[in-house]
Amino acid sequence: MKRVSALILLCQLGVCFAVNSIVAIVNEDVITLQSIEQQLNDANSFNEKIDIVEKQIEIALQMSKVRKLGLNPSQGDINGVLNQLAIDNNISMEQFQSYPQFPSLVQQITDRLSILNLQQYITKDLNIELFENEINNCTSNINDKNTKQIRIAQIIISEIDNSDVIIDNQEKAVRNFLKKLSDHITKGASFEAFAKLHSQHSSYVNGGLTDWIFVKNPTIEMFDLLEDGEVSKIYSTDVGWAIAIKVDERYVDSNLENCKEKMIYQKTQQFYTDWLQDLRDSAYTEIYTDKL
């Protein structure tokens, strides 16, 4: 009955596909042959084709949750990734946009950022603690606290929500706004308060505070050199532009900390995998194997 209602709904929306183009139904969504045709052509066996469809089902379920929770990435987030890709490939954005595959790439980036937002949302309140025996399994050659870590607070802004600001001038508008915030903070305004009020990154709830990070690249070294209360220069991130202050520092055994971080990451990923499996188990899905 649910299958029939799903198809009727799709027809009512004017998106009724030819029957032979549908390879799977996922609740009220469909997966079409055309959407995964290239991947299916590259598959070497029937089982590989089934795996491809199953993966698309998982993506469809996650994207449905993204829409319901309003977790779509901002245009600024998407533009930030595109700009970085253009820089990495040493081409201009105009050249990048001229490629025939550009629209498909934008969709892939949008989907990946959406799912990343969902993962962060589902695991944001997760408090993972390691047991003593797990920590003991983290071996270290020398128990020497000689590696530096710091914590910083950031204000990250991807776009200015202003009808007078056109897309091409977003970076300039964001930089100007961050410069104004920096000046106020230098004069004594609260960085934490500004982060909670203006930052467009999920860390805003903690005043922009990050986890402990190792001092191991030029950007982090720049943060480490900041004086107490000094605001960093404006810098680019994967999701926009930012300013930061240094909050704290410590010295740790890097081998031990790396091992603990890896274990926490694995447990976080397992938590999300289990959540996704529950989502999959409770969903209505049907795969038309004869179309593969």
Image: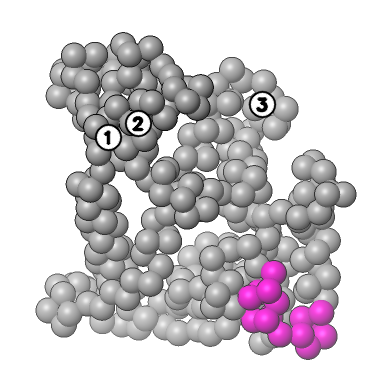
Q: For residue 49, which quarter of the picture?
A: top left
Of residues 212 and 2, the one nearer the viewer is 2
Locate residue 164, reporting x and y percent.
87, 49
SS category of the residue bearing label 3? helix
User: Is most of the magenta stretch helix, strand or loop?
Assistant: helix
Q: Which residue is mark 3?
A: 97
Locate residue 275, reporting x and y percent.
26, 56
C-alpha span from label 2 to label 1:
6 Å
Q: Which residue is mark 1?
A: 2
C-alpha span from label 3 to label 1:
41 Å
Q: Which residue is mark 2?
A: 6
Let me know if residue 222 appears in the view: yes
Asked if residue 273 is among those painted magenta in the image, a careful observer would answer no
> In the figure, is residue 53 to the left or right of 21?
left
Residue at 47 percent across and 25 percent down: it is 12
Which residue is at the far left? 133
**Badge 2 amino acid:** Ala
Q: Earlier in the sequence, mark 2 or mark 3?
A: 2
Near mark 1 (Cα within 10 A), the count class, few <14, some 14-19 or many ≥20, is few
Near mark 3 (Cα within 10 A), the count class, few <14, some 14-19 or many ≥20, is some
Q: Nearer the viewer, mark 2 or mark 3?
A: 2
For the C terminus, which image quadrant? Answer: top left
Q: Which residues are magenta?
A: 184-198
